[in-house]
Amino acid sequence: MTGLDELPIRDDLRGLSPYGAPQLDVPVRLNTNENSYPVPEPVVEAIGKAVAAELRDLNRYPDRDALALRADLAGYLGHGLTAEGVWAANGSNEVQQQLLQVFGGPGRSALGFTPAYSMHPLLALGTGTRWEPARRGADFGLTAQEAVSQVRQHRPDVVFLCSPNNPTGTALDPAVIAAVLDVAPGMVVVDEAYAEFARPGTVSALAVLAGHPRLVVTRTMSKAFGFAGGRLGYLAADPAVVAAVQLVRLPYHLSALTQAAARAALAHRDALLGTVAAIMEQRDRIVTELRHRGLRVADSDANFVLYEVGGDQSVAWRALLAHGVLVRDVGLPGWLRVTAGTPAETDAFLAAVDRMLSEAA
Ligand code: PMP
């Protein structure tokens, strides 16, 4: 077999392994922040019909600009948005990759506040964009002052803010976003993959899009909509940003099947988003229960919880797995991340934590 190293791959990719959490076949999978609830039957039927209606025309390329889907997404987001200010791709990962292709790239840099979504630096790597790992403050927080001083220091072409932040779960104070917008010399991308799970009182960056042509908000149907397998992410921004992204997108990147399925899912958004409240309840329950057990837990506005295990997190990760519960080791010493799913999954997770704690005692 030919080894990867025998191929003339780029020097900066040598020795790397592909990104991805383990996809293990265990009873309770709480490691990728998926929505644990399957697609409800009426929505399954509607998506099936919408996809079936496309099949005869698969000899033709799809709408390259996905205009109908973008109009539907704009309608969902509100804030006066129209299709011209919305762009969609195969997951928000692809949206962010396109943003880096057009606003980053060789000779340019992108900055994020670590720990944050680990794909941001990998997308930078893949697009030849230099990555600046800026830091979050005490307890993973980020103040306007901390953010501004690091943006001023590095002057990146693209700043990533993640709100609610993955893996910590906490939403950003809108003052941080406003302060970064004031000083950033380039684009500011606010990754709001988990926005629908935010606690009351949090504010989406969508509210400040008007008048900020360098602000981009990315969203996804993978989490709240329970549509991760459908692969549909999107952004909202000034129409000029959408025009810019179209310079680098592959023609026909969104298949006719994806567009039809996503539109049907959006048309049934009440049914799909009906799980959000139940998931938030389990999220809050996990936070409360872990704190009762004396563990430190980050405040969560997302569908997951970051908690301190009190010891080596890789040992705790394996112990939970031995009890049939798969959580995420995000590489933060002493901390693990667990997705909030169904009440039964929370029961199983808490029972596994209790067994672990009693074994350790
Ligand atoms: N942003 C954040 C913060 C995420 O956690 C994820 C998924 N783990 C994504 C973006 C990408 O999701 P998708 O490509 O499925 O839209």
Image (cartoon, rainbow, N blue to C red):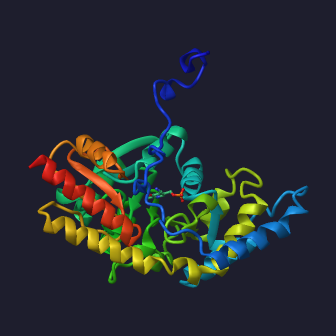
Does residue 17 show up? yes
Quadrant containing the N terminus is top right
Which residue is nearer to you in this view: 331 or 313? 313
Residue at 31 percent across and 51 percent down: it is 115
Residue 227 vs 315, above or below: the answer is: below
Report whether 139 appears left or right of 179: left
Residue 267 vs 117, above or below: the answer is: below
Marks counted in the figure total 0
Residue 207 vs 21, above or below: the answer is: below
Percent position of residue 63, x then y: 80, 64
Which residue is nearer to you in this view: 203 or 25? 25
Quadrant for residue 41, please give it. Answer: bottom right
Percent position of residue 326, x then y: 37, 51
Residue at 37 percent across and 64 percent down: it is 345
Does residue 81 show up? no
Q: Residue furthest left?
A: 361
Residue at 45 percent across and 48 percent down: it is 119
Percent position of residue 310, x then y: 14, 50
Residue at 58 percent across and 85 percent down: it is 80
Quadrant for residue 54, please give it. Answer: bottom right
Percent position of residue 216, x then y: 51, 65
